[in-house]
Amino acid sequence: MTARGTRQGLDAEDLDVEEALALVKDGNGTARPADGRSPAQREGGGHATSPSSPSPSPSSSTRTPETAHRADAAEHRHQETSWPEARKIAARAARSGAARLAPVSVTLGDALGLVLAAPLTALTDLPSFDTSAMDGWAVAGPGPWHVREEGVLAGSATPVSLADGEAVRIATGARIPPDTTAVLRSEHGRTDDNGRLHPTREMQHGQDIRPRGQECRSGDQLLRAGAVVTPAVLGLAAAAGYDTLAAVPRPRVEVLVLGDELLTEGRPHDGLIRDALGPMLPPWLRAMGAEVTAVRRLGDDAKALHKAITASGADLIVTTGGTASGPVDHVHPTLRRLDAELLVDGVKVRPGHPMLLARLKEDQHLVGLPGNPLAAVSGLLTLAEPLLRTLAARPAPEPYALPLRQSAHGHPHDTRLIPVVLRGDHAVPLHYNGPAMLRGIAAADALAVVPPGGARAGQEAELLDLPWATAGIDACFT
Ligand SMILES: Nc1nc2c(c(=O)[nH]1)N[C@H]1C(S)=C(S)[C@@H](COP(=O)(O)OP(=O)(O)OC[C@H]3O[C@@H](n4cnc5c(N)ncnc54)[C@H](O)[C@@H]3O)O[C@H]1N2
Ligand code: MOO
């Protein structure tokens, strides 16, 4: 953890002022490591591959502590990836051949939310037999009809064929007797004193009969590969004869929560705080289509982190905290030790700019989320979401934008993500959107993407939906 922790009491505007002042002082807006050196320089040895080559530093003879600060900060800023590019890199990382997940066969009960790995092809005609669309009588020829005494055809009863002038009671969904010409609804028939059935309105040939194969023939493609399995898809698959589906499995994610200061119960005390990310991330990751295989609390222990990463068989490891350059921020040095390839090392986004994405193996990635809780949300949506979505073969959501009800302060150089509620056709920015705060996001419907420089009232801002805001809490946490 770092010693930077006094911002919690400030609201969004205070933060912007504070940040702007820091930028003026600093000259480039980069949060500087405590010792003024970039993480790459501080940690030395066994280097993880950096996403872009750093610009040359001033030579040691001209390098005063102050110029070194500026040069290193500028250098690290230079390496930071733009927010849109970071999302693209994360999606691309999951597209490489080795990262792709092999399709699995899953029961219908386990398939909700997965993506079909093969087209859904009808295993039967639907309906699979001629069936009555209404409760009434199956009739043959024009009325009046003699009604057979055999009771009501319902369920799977095997019907006997009708002779011209005959009718039989029938229930919705029952098999139509051979030679039936129409179904007369119960409310459209009248029985006379001789027990003969008369239609009370004109009938069409074939009326209220659902012919076999009306919806599909066996072998017809009902849905393409890549379709998301919704409750409706489960129903269709069952109707079409499926017990299991070929689907892309959920990517397996392991969450490693770092920080010695974290409590798992009770109230904060003695400089210790509650772990907010352990409870928040697993259901959020599940809502993004992942299977969370483990949540481990490792403290600030570099050895434990190294061991947990090397022992993990997950497709994606998500770490929380330890991404910055404090004395106990172990993520960068551990990635270097593992010879991981840093695909993204810092993103031009607030909050959350120290977030990172590394490739550990051809088929295993690591997303390092910053420890500040809203910064972690930002990292989750910027890096983990595109990666998991692509691994799970889910389609990208249609981008959408709404005008902002009030102006939103921007960062001079970075994108800002701000919790908003959606009211009518506007997005209303929420307070309590500082990096260490969850109060805004907990009340939010979406995050607004505010471009560098900010957005005026009425200006459209791209919105990132929160999975529960539109789908309802039960629908998305499958
Ligand atoms: N010298 C620098 N210091 C910091 C920089 C920087 O660039 N140079 N960046 C700042 C920014 S921005 C962020 S964001 C944080 C990111 O820090 P870390 O990822 O290293 O996270 P920690 O230092 O471990 O923790 C930061 C903060 O968050 C609290 N935290 C951590 N884990 C949890 C959790 N599971 N639940 C609730 N709160 C958590 C932790 O106690 C700290 O208060 O670094 C800045 N510093
Ligand atoms: O500003 Mo950090 O990026 O607090 O999240």
Image (cartoon, rainbow, N blue to C red):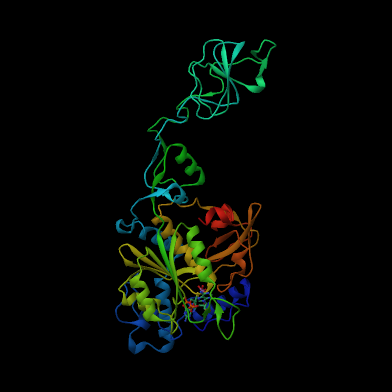
Q: Quadrant of residue 72?
A: bottom left
- Tell me if I can see residue 443 in this picture: yes
Q: Which of 29 and 401 is in front in this view?
A: 401
Asked if residue 255 is positioned above or below residue 102 in the image, the reply reads below
Q: Where is residue 418 in the image (x, y as percent from the top left)?
A: 57, 65
- Tell me if I can see residue 350 in this picture: no
Q: Quadrant of residue 344?
A: bottom left
Q: In this view, does 136 lie to the left or right of 30?
A: right
Q: Position of residue 62 (x, y in %)?
A: 36, 88
Residue for point 47% across, 39% down = 236
Q: In which quarter of the image is residue 446?
A: bottom right
Asked if residue 92 is positioned above or below residue 236 in the image, the reply reads below
Asked if residue 242 is positioned above or below residue 14 in the image, the reply reads above
Residue for point 38% across, 41% down = 119
Q: Nearer the viewer, residue 200 or 322?
A: 200
Residue for point 36% across, 79% down = 333
What number of labels is visible?
Answer: 0
Q: Nearer the viewer, residue 354 or 132?
A: 132
Q: Which residue lies furthest to the front in this view?
A: 150
Q: Which residue lies furthest to the right in this view?
A: 193
Q: Nearer the viewer, residue 429 or 387?
A: 387
Q: Position of residue 206 (x, y in %)?
A: 53, 18
Q: Is residue 128 left or right of residue 144?
A: left
Q: Position of residue 250 (x, y in %)?
A: 41, 56
